[in-house]
Structure formats: structure tokens, C-alpha cells
Image: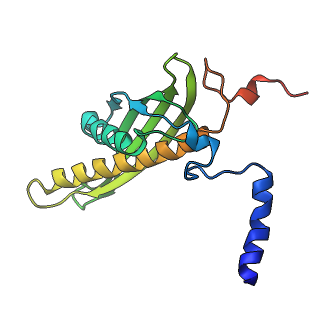
Amino acid sequence: MIRAALLGLALLPLTACGFTPVYGGGQGASYANAGPIQVSEIRATATMGSAPGRTGHFLRQELVRTIGQGVPGFSAGTLDVNLRQTIERLAFAPDQAASRSDYVGNATWTLRAASGDILGTGTVEERASFNFADAAYADMAAQTGAQERLATLLARSIRADLIMAGGKKVDPKTGKPADSAVPKP
């Protein structure tokens, strides 16, 4: 009984500041204006021999699955993502062949309204490791698994960025925070 009272007192300041949960069960204004988000084809570039199309495909699938129904704070929009990925060699065998590597993905995203106005922008970076195996074709399976993990990690980070951007005002032409356009005395 005392714990419930203390919890209620601890949460009281949050209600005074207008706090509403992101997924507030339909109660909050953020939830009410969540609309569908179209995910454009991922534009991908790669360096050092990685396959951009595969990771971009996995990333788009994960984004459609996780944010396609909408994100609180955005009534609707189109998400554009530029993916850049590289391979970093981490460990070497005695014969100097790479034995462990990382796929490093850097995704820059922009969410636009139907009018073309920018609703939010951001950049995320993630990495997924894989080992080179001795068995034939096992290294290809390890690389594919790492690309899928990288895409999942990037999609989670983009989704988290979108949720955080949902409550912020941005300049519709540049995507920069609206507060930075006003000079401070």
C-alpha cells in the first residue's frame, strides 16, 4: 500500500509537465496522429567488396515491418534512407588472412510529408561481426547472417530516432531543429 502511494507521488511531476507515453493506448495526442509511413527503396553504397543490395533489402523489410503502420508524432510520411556499409577486418590468422570482420553500416534517413516538407532527419551507425569459417560456403552464410543482423540493428536505431523526432519541431526545408534558427541573445 505504501509502495503504491510512493509510486503515485513519484509519477505526479510527470503528469504536470504534460508527459504522455509514446504508445499510450490511444490516450495521448502523439498516438492519435500516427499514420502510415511509406519506406522508399534503400539507396545503398558500399566499399571494400560488400554487397549493398542485400543489406538494403533486409533493412527495408525490417523498416516496413516495424514502422510501416506509423510512428507516434507523425501523421504520415515517406521515409528515405541512404545506406553506406563497409567491412572492417578485425582479426588475422597466422597467414595474414582475415579471420574476423565487422560489417559497419551508416544510415542517413529523412522523413518527408506528402507536400515534400521534411518532418525529421537523422543518422545512425551500427556494426555486426562475423567469423570466416574453414568449411566451404560457411563464410558466405556467416556474412549473410551478419548483414541481416546489421539491417535489424539499423532499423531499430532508425525507429528509435523517429520516435524521438516525433515530438520535435524542425524547419520543413532543411530538417534542422526549429530552435536553432532563432538566434539567442
Work out whether residue 182 or residue 111 is closer to the camera in this orientation and state it: 111
What number of labels is visible?
0
- Where residue 78 sits, quadrant-wise, is top left
| 14 horizontally vs 146: left or right | right
Q: Position of residue 128 (x, y in %)?
A: 36, 53
In the image, is residue 90 above or below residue 124?
below
Whether residue 112 is visible here, answered yes or no, is yes
In which quadrant will I find the N terminus? bottom right
In which quadrant will I find the C terminus? top right
| 38 horizontally vs 174: left or right | left
At a point 60% along the width and 41% down the height, the residue shown is 30
Work out whether residue 17 or residue 102 is closer to the camera in this orientation and state it: 17
Q: Position of residue 19 (x, y in %)?
A: 71, 51
At a point 86% along the width and 28% down the height, the residue shown is 184
Work out whether residue 138 or residue 37 is closer to the camera in this orientation and state it: 37
Q: Position of residue 180 (x, y in %)?
A: 74, 28
